[in-house]
Amino acid sequence: MFEIACDKPHRGSAAACASALPPLPGLGPGGAVAFAPPEPGVPRRPAMPRERLREAGPGSLSDLELVALLLGSGLPGHDVFEVARSLLKHFGSLRAMLDAGREEFEGIRGIGPAKSSKFVAVLELARRALAEQIEEKPLIDSPGAVEDYLRLLIGGRAHEVFVCLFLDIRHRLIRTEESTRGTLTRMAVYPREIVRRALMLNAARLIVAHNHPSGAVQPSASDRRLTRILREALALVDVQLVDHLIIGTQETFSFARHGLD
């Protein structure tokens, strides 16, 4: 077992355990939505977003309109735009909203299983679309797509997560597996188990990645040591470690790109 200290969790992460969070903005007593008034200069009700979507495309819509379209309907006494505005205020960002689980959505008054499932499905569809893209050609030819995929997969997690992308001899993706999920303070990685999985999947290459919940992507001493141990262990069974990526919310650090072991 190789144990590494986790990066400090990002306190603003929407996926953080509710018991560890301070009172969230936009919520009233008991998790009820405290409906937010429009910002000065922002129309209370945008005009016909469905029609504008058809005529000008999704890029023409504001965040508020897109969230309203996903919601579909409001609550008695509160139209869908009021609910959408309050959700945006509650989560603080679109990424935090998309990283939230069903339970967090359903803890908000007026957001039941149907509405929460729509938001969860949007992120899952984006993940799968990127997974299809990186499966279509050798990953060595599409490093940007790999990084985008990993940001969607683990970039917004509240805890550190370690994932492995197993590749064949032509650098094509065989499988993505979550190897380890850390706690708030520590994450244990088992190089022997990773080597065993590579052999079982007949992998010739491997990309590994983990996230830093704080968003910072500079590698720690333990990150460097883990990379070296994995590279040496995989070399014993003739499997190449192509890269170790550290995924932040906005940035990515590549050991291969920086020439680090």
Image (cartoon, rainbow, N blue to C red):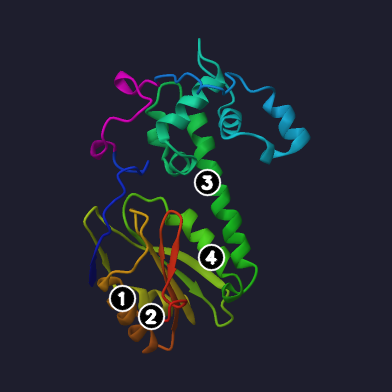
Task: Kindly identify the residue that appears in the image at 60 percent across and 70 percent down.
Answer: 142
Q: Give the residue type at disc 3.
A: Leu
Q: Position of residue 231 (x, y in %)?
A: 37, 82
Distance Cα–Cα, label 1 vs label 2? 8 Å
Q: Earlier in the sequence, mark 2 or mark 3?
A: 3
Q: Which mark is residue 260?
A: 2
Marks 1/4 in contact by CB < 8 Å: the verdict is: no
Distance Cα–Cα, label 2 vs label 3? 32 Å
Relative height, residue 201 to residue 209 (above, below): below
Q: Earlier in the sequence, mark 3 or mark 1?
A: 3
Magenta residues (range): 18-33
Distance Cα–Cα, label 3 vs label 4? 16 Å
- Label 1 element class: helix
Q: Tell which of 64 and 111 is nearer to you.
A: 64
Relative height, residue 192 to residue 236 (above, below): above
Residue at mark 3: 123
Q: Earlier in the sequence, mark 2 or mark 4?
A: 4
Marks 1/2 in contact by CB < 8 Å: the verdict is: yes
Q: Give the residue type at disc 4.
A: Val
Residue at mark 1: 224
Task: Kindly identify the residue that appears in the image at 41 percent across and 58 percent down.
Answer: 248
Q: Left or right: 244 with respect to 21?
A: right
- Label 3 element class: helix
Q: Which mark is residue 146?
A: 4
Q: Earlier in the sequence, mark 1 or mark 2?
A: 1
